[in-house]
Image (tube, grey):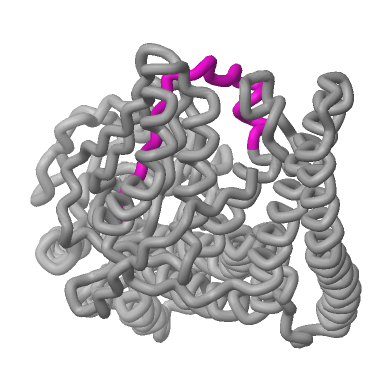
Amino acid sequence: MIRRLIVSYVALVGVALAAFTVPVAFTLTSQLRGDTEESVLREATTMALLLGDGDAPAREALARMAGAYADETPGTVEVAAADNRSAMPPLPLTARPHDAAFGDALEHGRTTVDWGSRFVWGPELVITVPAYARGEATGGAEGDDDGGAAESGDGDGDREGETGGTTGGTGEAAGETGEAVGGTVEADDADDGGQAVGSAGPADRIVGAVRVRYATADLTDRLWRIWGFRAILAVGVLAVAAGLGAIVARLLTKPLRQLNDMASRFGDGDLTARSPVTGPQETRTLARTLNQGAERLDTLVASQRIFVADASHQLRTPLTALRLSLDNIADGVDDEFVREDVEQATAEVVRMSRLVSGLLVLARAEAKVSAPEPLALRELVEERLKVWRPAADERGVTIVLTGDADDRARVLAGAGNLDQVLDNVLSNALEVSPDRGTITVRVETGGPEEAVLEVLDQGPGMSAAEQARAFDRFWRGQGLTGRSGSGLGLAIVKQLVTDDGGTVTLRDAPGGGLCVRIGLRTVGDGARWISPRPGAPRSGG
């Protein structure tokens, strides 16, 4: 959820940023293109006016202006005569006089603008302007000559600042032409920006054409600076937005994470789990509702456990008295049929006593979880096996201890929990093992933080469906223990192992039978050593 909130926030900021910066960048790009085209067209028109004057001084001024333009700008000037074949001294003949742009200028009097590409621009801007004979051109040829050249020069100087030195000193060269320039430049300004900027009337006499090739490398650099700066700025803004979004998302989802933690603990069986009542009004209401439900459920379960524990404890005394009474009856009865009935009743009383004892053990295990303590695993297993070997010897069953875990392996377990776990597992294994069979107890190191205890028997085993239900309370399998047990032994084992932070699973043993695998947490060398104390076997059935 946090990731989705961050992505949504960054996407929102990105859309807003793109909506603001992209139009601005396009506007600046269009403005750069328009200013450059206007400046170059102004210079080409000025040169065309000098070419149209026709006298030698004007030609000399045009040559100096073309040279200055080539030196101070990334542009070059080409001139073609009216016949499109001969040169106009002192200017050289263009290398490609017969292209379409010169043809349109000389034959139709059209001014053409070619950027070389429909996308932004190509490698160069090419503008071709026709030159009309002095006194025959339309538009501004009859305008006031006084101050016209200065006006043209001023316009050139202004465009120099806009295009980064495009025109350079061409304004000075244009100023030398004096009255030849006139006011015709402003007459052509109205036609700037089109593919065919202007055309001649039927009475105009075209004496030549001027072409300006302006390299766009500098414009491309400026374009990259325009877009690159905004791209870098956008990336920086998005990075900051992602960082802020992560902080805001974690703050907003903190109450939900607390509720999820509470639900996870509750699902794992911790009925004391509660969620802090924080955050917005909705999450506070939800937290209070969940806490109230958890409190009520905890109370109901606790009451049930108390009832089971009390009932089990109270039933033990009458069951013991009933068994003693049946034993006394059996001792004083000579009738075989009566004795058989009494023995059956005694067996049922024994089974009920085991069931009551198992319920009492399970209720106590669920009611109170003792703090795990470090225990010497192999030593504890050896002590419990000493207790169970006499019962196994009576049936000819051999108990074998194997594994690579040494005496230094210590695990975390509550006081007496691991003893009860081993007693229940060994009791079940002994009941299902055939005579002269073998029970293998394996103690191994499962990893840096886990020790594994496995008990393998040679009994009938369990199917996959039975293994899935084996830890349910009062469930009994089809083996010997299913007929005589209470169905609480493995439930007690799972409860005690889970309370100590371990795991217990069932699987098929190699060669047949059942393998009970118990994973226990290990401790470091600095933990306190607690030796197990031997005692009588304890089994919940």
454 falls in the magenta region: yes
258 falls in the magenta region: no
Up/down of 403 relative to 437, above or below: below
22 to the left or right of 450: right
| Quadrant holding the C terminus | top right
> Is any atom of residue 256 visible in this view?
no
Looking at the image, which residue is at 81% across and 63% down?
A: 317
Looking at the image, which residue is at 61% across and 55% down?
A: 495
The image quarter in which residue 72 lies: bottom left
The image quarter in which residue 16 lies: bottom right
Q: Which one is in front, 1 or 368?
A: 368
Looking at the image, which residue is at 51% across and 55% down?
A: 420
x, y percentage for residue 268? 65, 58
x, y percentage for residue 173? 20, 73
Up/down of 309 relative to 502, above or below: below
Up/down of 465 relative to 132, above or below: above
| Quadrant holding the N terminus | bottom right
Q: Which one is in front, 235 or 352?
A: 352
Q: What range of the chain is rendered magenta?
A: 450-470
> Is any atom of residue 296 visible in this view?
yes
437 to the left or right of 169: right
Looking at the image, which residue is at 86% across and 59% down?
A: 318
Q: How many marks?
A: 0
x, y percentage for residue 10? 57, 65
x, y percentage for residue 533? 36, 67
281 to the left or right of 71: right
Up/down of 487 relative to 42, above or below: above
Q: Which one is in front, 325 or 454?
A: 325
